[in-house]
Image (spheres, helix red, strand yellow):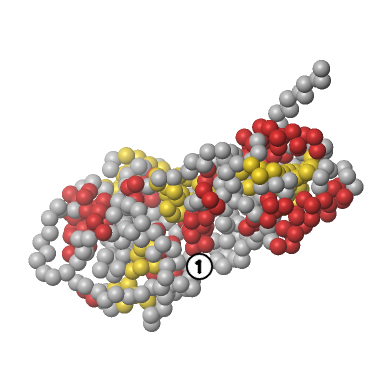
Amino acid sequence: MPKVLINGVEKDVPVGTLVLDACEQAGIAIPHYCYHPVLSPVATCRMCMVEIKGMPKLATSCTTTVGPAPKDNPEGIAMEIITNSKAVADARAGVMEFLLLNHPLDCPICDQAGECKLQDYSYEYGSGDSRMGEVKRRYRYEDLGGKIVIDKNRCIHCTRCIRFTQEISGTHELTVAQRGANLEVTTYSGKSMDANPWAGNVVDLCPVGALTSRDFRFNRRVWYLKNIPTISRHSALANPIWADVDQNKVWRFRPRPTEGKTAVYFISDEERSACHDYNLKPETRLMKPSMKRVETSIVAIRAALQQAGPTAVIAQGVFGCDAAQRLGDLASKSEWRFGIGTKSYAIQLPKLQTHTDGIYNRRGFTERGFRFSMLDELEQLVKDGSVKALVLLYDAPFSNAKETERLKALIAAAPFSLVLESVASEIGDAATAGLPITTYLEENDFVTTHTGELRRYQKALEPPKGVKTVPLWVKELAKASAPVPAAV
C-alpha cells in the first residue's frame, strides 16, 4: 500500500484512491460541489483543487488518483499533497468569486439556508466582498412538476442532479443547455419529474437552493430541526434515514448514507412522503386500553388474558426485534409464535432495490421463534381448542385483504383476543381487547434486514400519555394477577 504525504502527515492508502478521499481519510476536509461518492466525477466546480508536488498546475482532487510508490523505492512516498498553500487558497477564493457573481442574495427566503455549501464555503474560503458591478443574470421560470421546484438563478451548474437522472434513476429528465455565460440546467422539452419515483433525491444532492421540495418548502427552518437516526419502514431494505423533528412533529425524511453502500444514499419518494403518516392527531389514534373499544384498565385485560387459557401470539415482521422477543414470551409454547405480513414493493431500480419483501424484519422475527406462512396450523389449533387466546401485534398497511380476512376469522373463533396497534383498524374492532402502542418513531429498537444487517433506530417523538411500547405492555401483561380474597 503506497504512502502519501498530506500537509506533511504520512498516510497509507490503496492505489487508485481519489486524492479527495485520501485527504478525508487523513481528517482534512476538501471543499467540493460537484463530487459525490456514488456519481461519476466530472471536476466541473474546481473547488477541490490541491497542490501536488511534481505537477505544474493545481489538480482537481476528485479526479486525481494515488499511484503506486516509485519502483526504485517501494517504501517511498508515492505522492505529496498540499491543501493549505497560498496557491490553493487563492484558487478557492477565485472559484467562490465566480460562483457568486450571478448568485442571488436571497438566503433569508431560501429553503437551503442552514444546509447550503455555498454559504459555508463562502464564509470559509471566500474573499468577503464582491467586485461585481453589473446586473446579475436571470433565468426564466421552469416547471418541474408537483414534487420539485427549480430556481435556476441559484444553480451553480455542479450537474449532480443531471448525473443522478442519467446514472441512477435512468429517467434523463435533466440536461445541460447552452454554453458559457448562458449555461443552464434544464429539462428535455418541458419534461416534468412527476413520473420519477425517486425525484426527491435531487433535492438532497443539490448543494445550494436551486432544487427544493414542494412538500417541505417554506415549512420549517432547518436549524430548528433535530436530526434523529432511524430507518424507513416503507422499503424492503429498512433503509437508514434521518427523521428531522421539531415540536414533536416529523417534518421530513432524508437518506442517511453509509460509506460504500450505494443503495442507502437514496430513498424513494414513497419513503419520503411517509413522514406524514407518523404525525398522528390525538383523535385518530388509540390512547387507552379497551375492551370492545370501551375504555378499561390494563389490570382487567391482564386478568382476562390469564383466565382465557393457552395463548398464541401473532405479529407482523415490521416491528422491532426487542418487541418481537418480549411479545414471544406471552406464547404458552415456543412454537405458538406466528409471523404474518404480505407487503411487497416492486423493484423499480435494481441497483438500489434488491428485495421485494416489505416485511423487512422477517429475519429478526424468525430468529426469535416466529414462524411465517403457518396460519393454517394456528387455525387448526384454535378450532380444536388447544389455543384459547390470541395476542396480535398489528399494523393494517402491512397485511393485504386476504390475510386480514383470515385474521378476523381467527379472532372470531378464539374465546379471547388482544390486539396491540397504534391506530384503530377492523382487526382491532373485532378483537376482545386492545392496547395502544407507540409508533416506531416513538421508541428505540432495532431490526435485522433480509441480508442479515442489524439496523438500529432511535426515539424521535414523544408518545401521548398512556401509550406505551410493546415491551412495556408485555411486562404489564406478564405480571401475576392479584389473588382473589377468600370468602368470609
Residue situated furthest top in the rendering: 488
> Where does the image place residue 312, in percent across and percent down from the top left?
78, 42
Could one spot residue 214 in this view of the protein? yes
Q: Is residue 326 left or right of residue 254?
A: right
Q: Nearer the viewer, residue 23 or 243?
A: 243
> Where does the image place residue 316, in percent across and percent down from the top left?
68, 50
Which of the 4 image quadrants contains residue 103?
A: bottom left
Residue situated furthest front in the rendering: 488
Which of the 4 image quadrants contains residue 113?
A: bottom left
Q: Is residue 88 left or right of residue 80?
A: left
Labels in figure, total:
1
Q: Residue at x 45, y 66 (%)?
A: 199
Q: Residue at x 76, y 37 (%)?
A: 305
Could one spot residue 261 in this view of the protein? no
Under mark 1, the amino acid is Pro
> Where does the image place residue 335, in percent across and percent down from the top left?
81, 42
Q: Nearer the viewer, residue 442 or 291?
A: 291
Which residue position is annotated with label 1? 197
Q: Is residue 157 left or right of residue 389?
A: left
Quadrant of the snapshot with the C terminus: top right
Q: Residues within 10 Å of mark 1 (few under 14, many from 20)?
A: some
For residue 363, above or below residue 147: above
Q: Secondary structure at mark 1?
A: loop
Q: Nearer the viewer, residue 316 or 199?
A: 316
Q: Residue at x 26, y 65 (%)?
A: 154
Quadrant of the snapshot with the N terminus: top left
Q: Residue at x 68, y 56 (%)?
A: 426
